[in-house]
């Protein structure tokens, strides 16, 4: 069987194709509005938290389909803590960041301990956090402010998690952005050819040259398009840097390190993992500690974007993260899934959200559509697996 | 001659690649106790599963004639309607339900959707009385011992109006007193006209209760003995169970010099993790030397796997006591990780359940127990990983297009080779192979035997746990015989015969 026949390549990248189709659909339906430069920025800034939380959720799900329901409430709680220290108590930005990170680690350690060492089912342990942190966060914010919100965050903190890099005014071509874009294209394309070459030299199975060409052209095109759009809209959004950095790091961990392999194995077969000398408890512990730390980053992104800590911040974020994973092909039973897949899932949901908003579709209907997409993704996944099993 | 209640005629049952039953005939007379004896895997349980409808009509060949009618059972419900009730070896009771709830599970008393609890418990008490159990039917199952649980199973069967009761190894988890009581209960039932089939390894029990004994071997019924007329001495029965020709099924060992003691355990005792009073390994002492293959033979449930896993970093059991020496030095291994670091490997009998990750590739499975050996600062050298996996695949003759292939797509024999590769790559001095040839075809078996020979030739020590007598005798240098949690005998392979090994087990059963 040829792994690189057109049919198989399409099959392997179904979600990417679906994403393009959906995008084109909305481009038509919104008469091209979705294609404005500002919408590209909106897509990233509005959905950055999904990528970050989705990465954490991916690591939890890899260990055996485990989820964290508390991330949305914890986003709210961390926002409140950050507000109390950096705004009301005038603590400087580095120290405020250390404080919220400390709170995140504290919660992560507690959660990891409950789940990994006391064997409390993750959904129960995190359901407690879901309730408690929403309550605590709201309580703090209503106590200190009549509007249940803290605004006037210090500029350095906002700059770290929002705005643009080397900002220029909209409509003027942003040169640094272009430079970064060109560098990224060169890196990606060179890497494609180099890794193919390396595989070829070692005598491994290699993809045909045509496939590498096509892949390179496509990737260069997408990066080029994004670069151009961002360059026309004031520059690269700061959150994009965070998102790309986090995804690259976690992709490396999952694909290339012993830790990543341990996560996959525990989710693939916990007993096998245990008898192979893997400490399953440590893996579970790390998964939830990591989730809490990433939640802190997501919370700061959201707080900086709204320039305020709100009592309603983070609502349903856990569902967004889980949806991104499921749509992105992460196994609901654990053991398989990639950062890249999750990112495609997050982007697809983001595009659907944005497109429907631009079309002026009512919020309630948006939820109905998103639910349908989630279900369709899972049914599709099961269906393709069944079919491939028959062959 | 009494009326024949059940006749199974020319039953043949095939699984993919294996003929589990080959033209089996069985006649059971009404009001008698009929015993089925044979080695593990001889086909006794398969036969009973055919009878009770676990394997529905149409998946086997032959006829079941029950009470004069040819029967077609499509599921267990069908056979139970006719009064054929099977009690499986593994008790199927739910610990957190009461005796009464368990007894009428799937057979609830009451009308339509509404369970009549008064009726349930009063009927349950009635049946409990019959089996001689004085506990209230509202007691939770987890609060009574295994002996009583077995009686509950029987009461449950009676509640289904059993006319033909099948007991699969009913005493395997019972102590001597409980076993005796159970056997006496069977004799009592017989007086009242019940017909029973008992499957057992314990020949003394069989000769105590049975009227007829049918010997099953390699999927065929060999003979049926009448306990009143025929010689039913143990030697006679054992001969029927094991007698088969030993052809050239085992490769010759290379000239290997047997060296110093590599692994030694003394007074090793392990308790069951759930039934914490039950000893699953009882004061076992054994050793294996460098370059030696030591076989551990025993029937299922003898405690062999439990022994192996408790040695391998205490991965099974609680309350483990005794000493473990590796290379002459006493060590305490608290986790599989430490065991691997001390060059110990446990190659599981359950490769799908806890040996391999079926959804991962051959490559990833091969490297799993020794990722350290492939990585630097926690980053895996993927080229090296590929090379290692490919190297083992070619050395062990694993049939696969590439090491990227998912293990779940391989045949049993090839999966076993991947499992062996995984543990060979972990660089062990001592390998414990638990049923290394279970469920794989003859050709692959031979190749596994060759691998074992190569391992000892390279100075490793091998402990091979097996339920197959010819394999144990053909492959080992020395054999330990295990029964009911204890080592009951040790014998040099050169002196071992199937008969004398079996007699160790039978004798130990008597001494109890």
Image (cartoon, grey):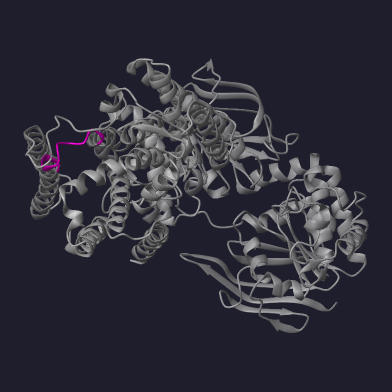
Relative side of B126 to A158, left or right: right
In the image, farthest residue toward the front: A146
Quarter holding the C terminus of chain B is top right
Residue bounds of the magenta highlight = A230-239
Residue at 16% of width from left, 51% of height from top? A36
Image height of B292 relative to A230, above or below: above
Tell me if residue A192 comes above or below residue A366 in the rendering: above
Q: Quadrant of residue B104?
A: bottom right
Question: Is residue A174 shown left or right of residue B415?
Answer: left
Instruction: Determine the residue positioned at 84% across, 65% down.
Output: B159
Q: Nearer the viewer, residue A297 or B441?
A: A297
The answer, for residue B374, to whether it is visible in the render is yes
Q: Position of residue B492 (x, y in %)?
A: 57, 35
Q: In this picture, is B212 found above or below A110?
A: below
Asked whether residue B425 appears in the rendered view, the answer is no
Q: Residue A88's image quarter?
A: top left
Q: Between A390 and B146, which is closer to the camera in this rendering? A: A390
Q: Position of residue A278 (x, y in %)?
A: 45, 32
Kindly identify the residue that appears in the image at 33 percent across and 33 percent down: A301
Q: Is residue B184 left or right of residue B34?
A: right
């Amino acid at each position: 069987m040829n792994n690189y026949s057109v049919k198989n390549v399409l099959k392997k990248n179904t979600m990417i194709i679906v994403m393009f189709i959906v995008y084109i659909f909305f481009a038509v339906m919104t008469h091209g509005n979705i294609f404005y430069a500002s919408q590209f920025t909106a897509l990233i800034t509005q959905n950055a938290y999904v990528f970050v939380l989705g990465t954490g959720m991916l690591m939890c799900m890899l260990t055996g389909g485990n989820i964290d329901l508390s991330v949305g409430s914890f986003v709210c709680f961390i926002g409140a803590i950050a507000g109390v220290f950096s705004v009301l108590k005038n603590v400087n930005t580095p120290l405020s960041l250390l404080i919220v990170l400390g709170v995140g680690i504290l919660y992560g350690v507690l959660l990891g301990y409950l789940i990994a060492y006391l064997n409390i089912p993750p959904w129960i342990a995190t359901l407690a956090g879901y309730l408690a942190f929403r309550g605590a966060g709201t309580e703090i914010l209503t106590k200190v402010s009549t509007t249940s919100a803290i605004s006037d965050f210090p500029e350095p903190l906002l700059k770290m998690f929002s705005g643009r890099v080397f900002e220029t005014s909209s409509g003027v071509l942003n040169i640094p952005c272009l430079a970064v874009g060109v560098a990224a294209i060169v890196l990606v394309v060179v890497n494609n050819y180099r890794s193919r070459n390396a595989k070829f030299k070692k005598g491994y199975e290699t993809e045909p040259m045509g496939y590498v060409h096509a892949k390179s052209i496509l990737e260069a095109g997408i990066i080029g398009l994004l670069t151009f759009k961002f360059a026309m809209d004031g520059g690269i959004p700061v959150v994009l840097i965070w998102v790309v950095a986090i995804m690259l790091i976690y992709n490396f961990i999952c694909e290339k390190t012993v830790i990543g392999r341990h996560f996959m194995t525990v989710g693939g077969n916990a007993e096998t993992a245990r008898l192979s000398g893997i400490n399953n408890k440590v893996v579970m512990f790390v998964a939830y500690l990591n989730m809490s730390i990433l939640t802190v980053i997501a919370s700061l992104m959201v707080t900086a974007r709204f320039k305020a800590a709100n009592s309603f911040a983070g609502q349903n974020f856990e569902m967004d993260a889980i949806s991104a994973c499921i749509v992105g092909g992460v196994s609901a039973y654990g053991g398989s899934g990639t950062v890249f897949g999750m990112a495609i899932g997050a982007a697809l949901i983001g595009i659907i959200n944005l497109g429907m908003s631009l079309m002026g579709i009512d919020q309630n209907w948006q939820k109905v559509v998103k639910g349908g997409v989630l279900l369709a993704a899972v049914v599709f996944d099961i269906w393709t697996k069944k079919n491939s099993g028959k062959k | 001659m009494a009326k024949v209640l059940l006749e199974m005629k020319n039953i043949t049952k095939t699984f993919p690649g294996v003929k589990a039953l080959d033209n089996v005939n069985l006649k059971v007379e009404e009001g008698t106790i009929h015993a089925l004896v044979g080695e593990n895997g001889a086909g006794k349980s398969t036969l009973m599963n055919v009878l009770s409808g676990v394997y529905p009509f149409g998946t086997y060949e032959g006829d079941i004639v029950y009470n004069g009618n040819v029967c077609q059972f499509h599921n267990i419900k069908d056979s139970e309607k006719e009064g054929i009730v099977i009690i499986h070896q593994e008790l199927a009771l739910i610990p957190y339900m009461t005796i009464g709830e368990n007894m009428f599970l799937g057979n609830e008393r009451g009308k339509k959707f509404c369970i009549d609890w008064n009726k349930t418990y009063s009927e349950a008490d009635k049946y409990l009385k019959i089996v001689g159990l004085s506990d209230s039917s509202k007691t939770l199952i987890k609060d009574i011992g295994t002996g009583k649980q077995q009686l509950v199973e029987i009461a449950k069967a009676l509640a289904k109006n059993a006319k033909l009761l099948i007991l699969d190894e009913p005493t395997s988890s019972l102590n001597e007193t409980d076993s005796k009581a159970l056997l006496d209960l069977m004799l009592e039932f017989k007086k009242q006209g019940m017909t029973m089939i008992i499957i057992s390894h314990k020949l003394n029990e069989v000769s105590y209760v049975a009227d007829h004994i049918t010997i099953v071997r390699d999927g065929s019924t060999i003979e049926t003995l009448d306990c009143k007329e025929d010689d039913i001495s143990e030697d006679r029965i054992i001969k029927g169970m094991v007698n088969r020709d030993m052809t050239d099924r085992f490769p010759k060992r290379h000239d290997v010099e047997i060296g110093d003691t590599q692994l030694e355990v003394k007074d090793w005792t392990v308790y069951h993790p759930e039934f914490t009073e039950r000893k699953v390994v009882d004061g076992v002492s054994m050793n294996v030397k460098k370059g030696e293959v030591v076989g551990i033979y025993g029937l299922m449930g003898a405690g062999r796997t439990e022994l192996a896993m408790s040695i391998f970093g205490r991965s099974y059991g609680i309350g483990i006591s005794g000493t473990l020496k590796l290379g002459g030095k006493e060590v305490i291994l608290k986790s599989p990780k430490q065991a691997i670091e001390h060059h110990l490997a446990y190659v599981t009998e359950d490769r799908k359940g806890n040996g391999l990750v079926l959804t991962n590739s051959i490559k990833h499975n091969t490297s799993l127990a020794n990722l350290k050996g492939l990585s630097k600062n926690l980053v895996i050298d993927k080229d090296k990983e590929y090379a290692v996996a490919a190297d083992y695949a070619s050395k062990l003759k694993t049939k696969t297009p590439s090491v990227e292939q998912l293990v779940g797509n391989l045949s049993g024999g090839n999966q076993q080779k991947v499992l062996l590769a995984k543990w060979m790559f972990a660089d062990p001095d001592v390998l414990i192979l638990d049923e290394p040839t279970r469920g794989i075809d003859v050709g692959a078996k031979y190749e596994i035997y060759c691998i074992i020979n190569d391992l000892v030739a390279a100075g490793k020590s091998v402990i091979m746990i097996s339920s197959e007598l010819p394999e144990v005798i053909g492959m080992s240098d020395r054999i330990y015989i295990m029964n009911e949690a204890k080592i009951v005998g040790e014998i040099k392979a050169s002196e071992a015969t199937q008969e004398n090994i079996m007699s160790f087990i039978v004798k130990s059963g008597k001494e109890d």
